[in-house]
Image (tube, grey):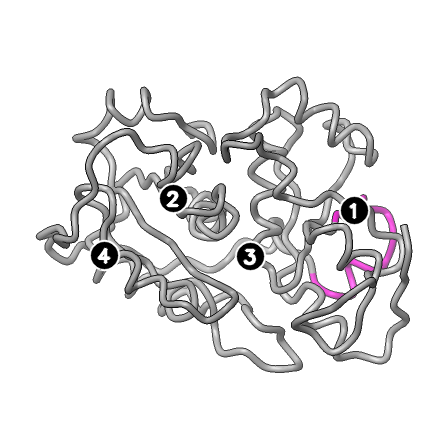
């Protein structure tokens, strides 16, 4: 399987062999599709987080539960992504949204990677024209249990539990989206956006390894990653894999599920 992070040089060398996917999405309600229609990387298809990469939101399941495998497969097929395609995904936020598509594809054995630097780091011309990609055959596959963690797994102990949200939300200083502030007791703060340099590219592998080591991840530990709704948590999992530290598990319900329960919430560092 290819590395979960590729750069523009890699993309240029493999341009005819990959499907580009634009996965822009905004928590403030702006339209990712509208942004795509204004200009995107040539040949890129648009993948919608809410309809293709997540199931219906609910207090019981969280804001972005995993999509039904048949829904996901249908969305990939409609976008022209087939079983044998290699997908390179990007957004304009350092990959923290596009990571969800990459993680889902890699979890079921498909070749997929994030474009390092994303749209802001792209050095070519953008286009408003959608590609003329025919529908493809993408076979539905169940999400592998070994790559997922339930709420019960996450609180059971025996794992290093990483919280990908910004530090202020982890501490409980503010909670703009979910019912309660704080974090899952015992979790360790590893804000995913700090996997990146100031220009939105991934830190060198040695520095990523230092970041993970500081929260107890050394390549031998079992890891569960969560965030607000199971999207940006994928960025930490891909960064971990990119750094050679294993693959870890995703807790899809994340804080948006946990905070609707009566379980205790921890605050502070």
Asked which secondary structure carries label 4, the reply is: helix
- Mark 2: give few (<14), some (14-19) or many (20+) Cα within 10 Å: many
Side of 142 relative to 207 (left or right): left
Instruction: Name the foreground residue: 125 vs 193.
Output: 125
Residue beneath disc 1: 189
Instruction: Residue under label 4, please give it.
Output: 38
User: Percent x, y for residue 114?
Assistant: 42, 38
Name which of mark 2 and mark 1 comes first in the sequence.
Answer: 2
Residue shown at 51% from the left, 68% from the top: 28
Q: Residue 125 at x, y = what percent? A: 19, 36
Seen at 43% across and 42% down, the residue is 109
> Whole-Å distance between the Cαs marked 3 and 1?
16 Å
Image check: 36 left or right of 217? left
Q: Marks 2 and 1, Cα distance to the nearest angstrom?
A: 25 Å
* Magenta stretch, residue numbers: 150-162
Q: Secondary structure at mark 3?
A: loop
Which residue is disc 2 drawn over? 90
**Which of the 4 image quadrants contains residue 185?**
bottom right
Residue density around tag 3, few if under 14, some if 14–19, many if 20 or more, within 10 Å: many
Q: Which one is in front in this view, the residue at disc 2 or the one at disc 3? A: 2
């Amino acid at each position: 399987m290819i590395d979960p992070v590729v750069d523009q040089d890699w993309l240029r060398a493999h341009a005819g062999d990959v499907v580009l996917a634009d996965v822009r999405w905004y928590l403030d309600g702006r339209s990712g599709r509208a942004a795509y229609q204004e200009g995107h990387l040539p040949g890129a298809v648009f993948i919608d987080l809410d309809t293709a990469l997540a199931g219906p939101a609910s207090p019981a399941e969280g804001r972005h539960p995993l999509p039904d495998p048949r829904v996901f497969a249908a969305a990939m097929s409609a976008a022209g992504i087939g079983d044998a395609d290699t997908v390179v995904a990007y957004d304009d936020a350092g990959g923290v949204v596009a990571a969800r598509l990459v993680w889902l594809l890699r979890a079921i054995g498909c070749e997929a990677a994030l474009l390092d630097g994303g749209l802001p780091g792209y050095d070519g011309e953008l286009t408003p024209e959608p590609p003329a990609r025919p529908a493809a055959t993408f076979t539905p596959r169940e999400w592998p249990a070994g790559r997922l963690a339930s709420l019960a797994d996450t609180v059971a102990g025996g794992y290093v539990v990483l919280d990908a949200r910004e530090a202020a939300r982890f501490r409980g200083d503010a909670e703009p989206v979910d019912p309660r502030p704080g974090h899952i007791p015992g979790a360790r703060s590893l804000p995913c956006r700090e996997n990146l340099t100031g220009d939105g590219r991934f830190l060198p592998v040695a520095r990523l390894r230092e970041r993970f080591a500081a929260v107890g991840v050394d390549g031998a530990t079992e890891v569960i990653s969560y965030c607000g709704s199971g999207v940006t948590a994928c960025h930490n999992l891909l960064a971990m894999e990119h750094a050679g530290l294993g693959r870890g598990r995703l807790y899809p319900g994340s804080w948006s599920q946990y905070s609707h329960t009566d379980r205790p919430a921890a605050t502070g560092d």
